[in-house]
Amino acid sequence: METRGVLELLLVSAEDLKHAHHHPRRSKRHYVTVECGGKTASSKITQGRGKKIWWNEKFRFPLSDAECKELAKVTLTIMEIDKFAEDTPVGETKVHVGEIISEGGEQEFLQVKPAPYNVVLEDGTYKGVLKLGIKFISSVRLAPSTDCVRWSVPAARQPSVGYGLFLHFACPSIPWRRLFFFCSRSSDGQSGNKDL
């Protein structure tokens, strides 16, 4: 099968999702299944912290000439993991890529920056958004055995809280900021004597 082009999806994040399991103390774990024509791929499992869930993951789907003409949409289904039951679908997003592929074929390259797409629930209502970037590169040759290539984008490191959090919980009654401020002022090497 000759590859005419590559459709690349950047799965960034999801926000304000309706959770399938209503357990306030349990952390939510999610993954996304991506259906592109007859090919299916799954994202890594990510834990939801707060209202936003981050994946930062890319998927590459090589497409033949016939697939480029037939492919109209890509379906992304957000799944919530439960330890004791089957994984539950939270919602689904359908992204129409037919125009992107046709224009990308003419220009040899077309990129749509990450944008929010509505998440549709089972009852047809909207709740939450899925942020997704799309890129189509034409005239690319890949190995014929490559079905879907997936890799993670390195995320920016979050600064760690470290000692401040530990001291806050270990000894809440001691004003640590004043103690550290006093130590930093006295360690400057000034003895208090002024030059005359």
Image (cartoon, rainbow, N blue to C red):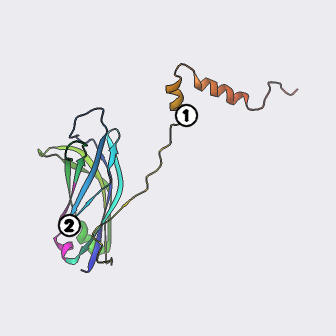
Local secondary structure at mark 2? helix
**Which quarter of the figure has residue 33?**
bottom left
- Kindly indicate the quadrant of the structure image that contains residue 102: bottom left
Identify the residue at image location x=20%, y=40%: 20
How far separated are the C-alphas under marks 1 and 2?
52 Å
In this view, the mark in front (1 or 2): 1
Which residue is tagged 1? 163
158 left or right, relative to 119: right
Q: How many marks?
A: 2
Q: Does 34 appear above or below 50? A: below
Looking at the image, residue 84 sits to the left or right of residue 150; the answer is left
At horizontal 32% and vertical 50% (from top left) the residue drawn is: 45
Q: Is residue 156 left or right of residue 137?
A: right
What residue is disc 2 on?
98
Q: Looking at this view, is 81 or 93 the one in front?
A: 81
Where, quadrant-wise, is the N terminus in this rendering? bottom left
Q: Quadrant of the C terminus?
A: top right
Measured as percent of width and height from the top left, residue 125 is found at: 14, 44
For badge 1, the amino acid type reads Tyr
Q: Residue at x 32, y 54 (%)?
A: 44
